[in-house]
Image (cartoon, rainbow, N blue to C red):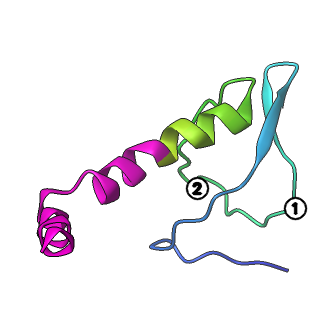
Amino acid sequence: MTSYKMNMLKTLWATVRQGKIELLESAELPEGTRVLVTLLPDDEAEFWLQASQTSLDGIWDNAEDDVYAQLLQK
């Protein structure tokens, strides 16, 4: 049995069936628990690739790393 603290964020997968959100795993959620619903595109893999691309761009296209390119030229 799983219980949740109110200050803890937890991701639960679900689908919509007949206009209702159904969790894909069992979870004990207290009545009145507030949830945030994020709609995923049909092609889930493409969504995660695009979502991670922003982070990768921030890491690879980083002006601070230019110092390493300068060191390699010496």
In the picture of the structure, the residue carrying the numbered disc 1 is 26
Q: Callout 1: few (<14), some (14-19), or many (20+) C-alpha neighbours within 10 Å?
A: few
Q: What residue type is labelled 1?
A: Ser
Report whether residue 37 is seen.
no
Q: Which amino acid does label 2 sit on?
A: Thr
> Looking at the picture, how far across and down is residue 34, in whole percent?
53, 50
> Looking at the picture, how far across and down is residue 3, in whole percent?
70, 78
Residue 73 painted magenta: yes
Residue 53 is left or right of residue 66, and the answer is: right
Determine the residue positioned at 61% across, 30% down.
39
> Which segment did they paint magenta?
53-74
In the picture of the structure, the residue carrying the numbered disc 2 is 33
Residue 68 painted magenta: yes
Q: Which of marks 2 and 1 is in front?
A: 1
Q: Nearer the viewer, residue 46 or 37?
A: 46
Element class at badge 1? loop
> Looking at the picture, how far across and down is residue 15, in whole percent?
81, 35
Residue extending farthest top: 18
Q: Where on the picture, by quarter, is residue 26?
A: bottom right
Between the residue at mark 2 and the residue at mark 1, the CA separation in whole angstroms equals: 15 Å
Q: Quadrant of the C terminus?
A: bottom left
Determine the residue positioned at 65% across, 32% down.
46
Residue extending farthest front: 74
Q: In which quarter of the image is the N terminus?
A: bottom right
Determine the residue positioned at 63% across, 75% down.
4
Q: Nearer the viewer, residue 68 or 33?
A: 68
Residue 9 is left or right of residue 43, and the answer is: left
Q: Nearer the viewer, residue 68 or 22?
A: 68
> Looking at the picture, how far across and down is residue 18, in whole percent?
88, 19
